[in-house]
Each structure stands twice: as C-alpha cells, then as structure tokens.
Image (cartoon, grey):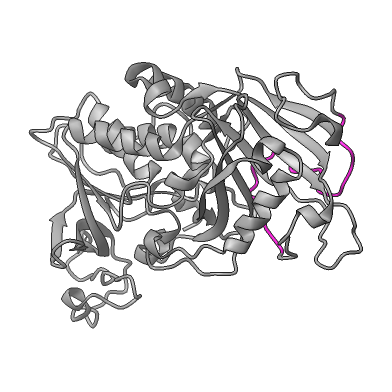
Amino acid sequence: MTMGGSDERKDIVIIGGGIIGCATAYYLTRHPSYDPKKHRIVVVEATRVAGGASGKAGGLLAVWAYPSNIVPLSFRLHQDLALEHGGEDRWGYRRVSCGNLEAHGRKRSELEGLGAAPGFSLGKRAGETRKGGKAWSGTGLPKDLDWILPELVQGYEEMGGSRETAQVHPYYFTMSLMDLAKASGAELVIGSVTKINYADVSSPASTPPPAIDRSGNKSPSTSSLSSSTSSSRSRRKAESVTYTDKETSRSVTVPASHVVLAAGPWTARLFPAAPITGLRAHSVTITPAGPVSGYALFTEISIPSPTEVGYRGPVSPEIYARPNNEIYVCGEGDMEVEVPETTADVEVDESRCDDLIAQVSSISDHIRLGRVTRKQACYLPVLNIGGSGGPLIGETGVDGLYMASGHSCWGINNAPATGLLLSEMIFDGKAKSADIRQLDPRRIL
C-alpha cells in the first residue's frame, strides 16, 4: 500500500550507505515535491559510505546489462549526472570500449598460486555461453589495445563501443552522490540498525508481528504483545528505525514514515523474508608500468601444462582500465565464507587475489611489471530464489517499507534508475520513469 501523498510530511530512513542508498537519497532530494523544511531524509550506514561492494566494484556501465526494463534509463541517467556534476573529473566517468578476449597465458611457472578453488560467474558477460571452450570468432586485437601481448591473443570480439559502454570509479561515484544529497538536506548517520519497528494499522483485535532484531530475536518492546492474536491477518506499517550509534554506542530510534531497505547482502538480517544472500568477489587494483587505453575486457585465458597439479582449465578474470592510470581486475565469486556482520569484517583471501594478479600478468607486461595497490573482497547482493533475477525494487507488502536490493554485479550500473524510481514511488505513489512490475518484491515475498 502506498503511503500518503506528496504534500504530507515524510520521514524517510534509508538503511545502507552503498550506491543504492546514496543514489536514492540523491534523487529524493531532487524530486520536485521535496522540501527540506517539511521532509527528512536520513541514511543510516553501519560502517562507512561505500564500504562494501559500492567501493570495490569495477564500475562498468553497459546498455546490454540487465534487467532490460531499467538499464536504458540508468545508462542515460549516468550521462546526465556526469554532465550536471562534472562526473568526468569527480568520479571518472568516461565512455570505453568493451570486448571478449581469448588468449593463451604464458608458462605455468609464471602463474604461481593459481588454485583449483571452484568459482561462480558474476553473470556480467552477455549470454554467458562460452564456458565450454568454443573458440571466439574475433576479428583481431584493436590497435589501441596495445597493453595486451598480441602474440598471445587467440581471438577478440567487440561487445560494445563507446556508445554502449562507459565506466565510473564506484567509490568516488558513491561518495559524490552522498555529498550531493547532504548538500540538499539529507542526513548521514553512522550506526548499525538493530531493528525496524512496526505499528498495527489493521483492526484493534489484530496484533502486528514483533520487530525482529539482527540476531533474529523478537524485540523486547513488542514481544509482550505476541499473545494477543487474531484470526485475520494483520497489516503492518513501518513506524521507526532503531540503530546503535557507532561513536556513542547509544541506541537511537528515529521516526520513519518510509523505510528503504538498501542494505545489499545484509537486507535479510533486518527483513528475514527478503530472498537476498551474498556472493563474495575478490579484486585487485594495479598501477600499470605504462599508460593503458580505455577498455573493459572479459577474458578467457588458457593456462599451459594441463597435467600440472592445480590446473583447472581456462580462467576468466575481468580487466578494466581506469582513467587514473589504474587497472582493476576481478574474478569469479565464491560462497565459502558467510556474509559477516558488517563490511568492515569482510575476509580477504589473499591467495585468490594473487591468482588474479598471476592470471592477468600472463598476458600483459604492462600489468606484470606494474605495482599492486590493493587486494580486496566484497559481497554482491544476489537473489537466492532459482529462476528469479534481481534486483527487487519497490513495496514489500508492509506499509511504508520498500526494498532496493539484489542488484548483483550491476549495482553501480543500475543505481541511478533505482534511486529515481524509488523517489517517484515515495513522492508520487508509483514508479513513472520505467515499468518495473517484474521487479516488484511482493511477487516473491
């Protein structure tokens, strides 16, 4: 049920300071009905803005991404944001070329540490059809892609030119949107949300389910009411959000007419019905030995000597050249370690990072002779329901409670559209800029 009209006071609490939460705050402050004297927007983040995947992603933008009902809108909004706010300088926005690259890596002895751990595709390649090893029908390496050793390339296939693909630096993009939102009246609170509190909006005989804290326990403030039940199904309304302030360790409750769950893989901790889990992804950043042209590469690298111990066939790291003379490399995801308490507790498996470095070094001396600047890991929010692609954007069936999660590897790409659509839902009562009925959380909750 949509909560109120645009003229009513709105206390909007956004849970999560990643790109989805920050983009939502930004677009709420840009909505024609937003009045900072009347409405309040609070972003509650447990550790730091862009502390999770939003600060460690690759930042690829593509018109061929998914889902198709919001991608064109989001791709255009990225360009609009860059033009309005100087995104080229502020967060590294630029158009790039993108391609599939098949290559033979150099000798196994130069790829120390390449393990045999199984991985999960991040799902970013259009089609995901070539894992079986069929040769790609490439037309040759582009001349300006001179930082890949041409004698090792078996095929190159363009996925998109500068009209279809672009990039941003995710950390700076997320931070910028939060700063812009704050400049227009939004507030940022660093604190860990412990529960969402609900009020009963059905008949007096009915009682709402108790608030659930992050450990799955009933909230003491409401559990005493659980004995009063009704045969009819009660309806709940989001009423407030309780968090523990990071600096003071005090418990604080803020009123909320609207709550936006944008907590990524942590969404289900606060709303157990959410079918969201986390896929861990490792990445590294490298300062190359020389300048590199603007390409995003999806690779399939064959490793020599298949009889050696630990050989696991072709590997598929993704390589993104950034405008600040940086190369970003990410690999397949894994689910070996559960999602931790916060982004600050994410465990980095350095051996996986070393594997990535070895893999991409095997086809590029610019990388091999470069300097590794960061080894990192994050968790991508993915749906754990088979046959249902993400994200989930919209109302949850609880009045005033919205979900914006499950964006998988396309969170940066689809954040502007997500934020704009949520701002429309909250202020206009419905999404106007795109048809997102297929992404309605109520379809699967």
Residue 300: x and y, percent? 78, 43
Q: Is residue 53 left or right of residue 262?
A: right
Residue 68 is left or right of residue 172, and the answer is right
Does 78 appear above or below 202? above
Residue 225 vs 340, above or below: the answer is below
Q: Quadrant of residue 319?
A: top right
* 364 sits left or right of 122 in the view: right
Q: Nearer the viewer, residue 142 or 87?
A: 142
Identify the residue at image location x=69%, y=40%: 125
Viewer-closest of 8 and 186: 186
Q: Residue at 41% across / 32% down in the picture?
A: 416
Give the percent coordinates (x, y) of residue 220.
19, 78
The secondary structure that most of the magenta stretch takes on is loop
Residue 425: quarter of image = top left
Compared with residue 21, is residue 85 higher up or lower down, i.e. above or below? above
The residue closer to the viewer here, 279 or 407, is 279
Farthest residue to the left: give it: 37
Lateral position of residue 364 relative to residue 171, left or right: right
In which quadrant of the rendered view does residue 311 lie? bottom right
Residue at (43% x, 24% y) in the render: 77
Residue 181 showing in the rendered view: yes
Q: Which residues are magenta?
A: 118-137
Where in the figure is residue 101, as x and y percent of width and height? 77, 35
Tell me which residue sits at (66%, 51%) in the image.
356
Q: Is residue 120 magenta?
A: yes
Residue 127 shows in this picture: no
